[in-house]
Image: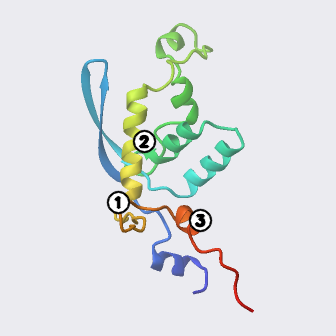
Amino acid sequence: MKLNIQSLQTIGAFTGRPIEKTVEWYQGEQRLSAEVFVRPLGFQSAVSDVLASTGRVDGVAGRIAASICDEDGNPVFTVRDIVDGPLDPEELAKDPESDKRLGALDGNLTVALLAVIHEVNEMGKTKSSAPSTSSGTSLSSTASAATRSRKPKSA
């Protein structure tokens, strides 16, 4: 295959339209739900992951900001919205120069958003299982390699 836009379109190498999901979480005793759109992991999340690996952005906030969008694929949050909250509208009304923020995104909502991001990105994927042993337990590939014979090869 030659790498070009047409060949990439043919194999489905672009993330496509955002997927609508319902996110549910508790705020104190109150159960809340909202419709969100989730962009499958792609370029934006890769950039966010690189920035997180160099300490430039928070990894969780970056993943949410790169994934949660509107129906047209436009981001809903910035990393700063998630980490510090949006600008406080009451403070802005008093002082248009205010930079006071509302505070970090609620923890329960953060976890719920990460769960729907995971759901969208695991859709259609099958989980591989580790090889079984005769006892019914499974071995990881690392453990399997460690149990192989270390007998030297004959010349």
Query: Residue 84 has which mark?
Result: none
Q: Residue 100, how many percent across, how many down?
A: 57, 14
| Amino acid carrying mark 2 in the image | Leu
Tell me the element at label 2: helix
- Where disc 3 sits, the SS reads helix
- 3D distance between C-alphas at marks 2 and 3: 35 Å
Using the image, tell me which numbered label, if any, was put on residue 114.
Answer: 2
Left or right: residue 19 versus residue 148 is left
Relative side of 12 to 50, left or right: left
Q: Can residue 18 be seen?
A: no
Q: How busy is the neighbourhood of tag 1: few (under 14 within 10 Å), some, or many (20 plus)?
A: few
Q: Mark 1 — residue?
A: 123
Furthest-right residue in view? Answer: 155
Where is residue 54, by image quadrant?
top right
Type of the residue with mark 1? Met
Q: Which of marks 2 and 1 is nearer the N terminus?
A: 2
Residue denoted by label 3: 146
Quadrant showing the C terminus:
bottom right
Q: Which residue is drawn at 49% across and 18% down?
A: 102
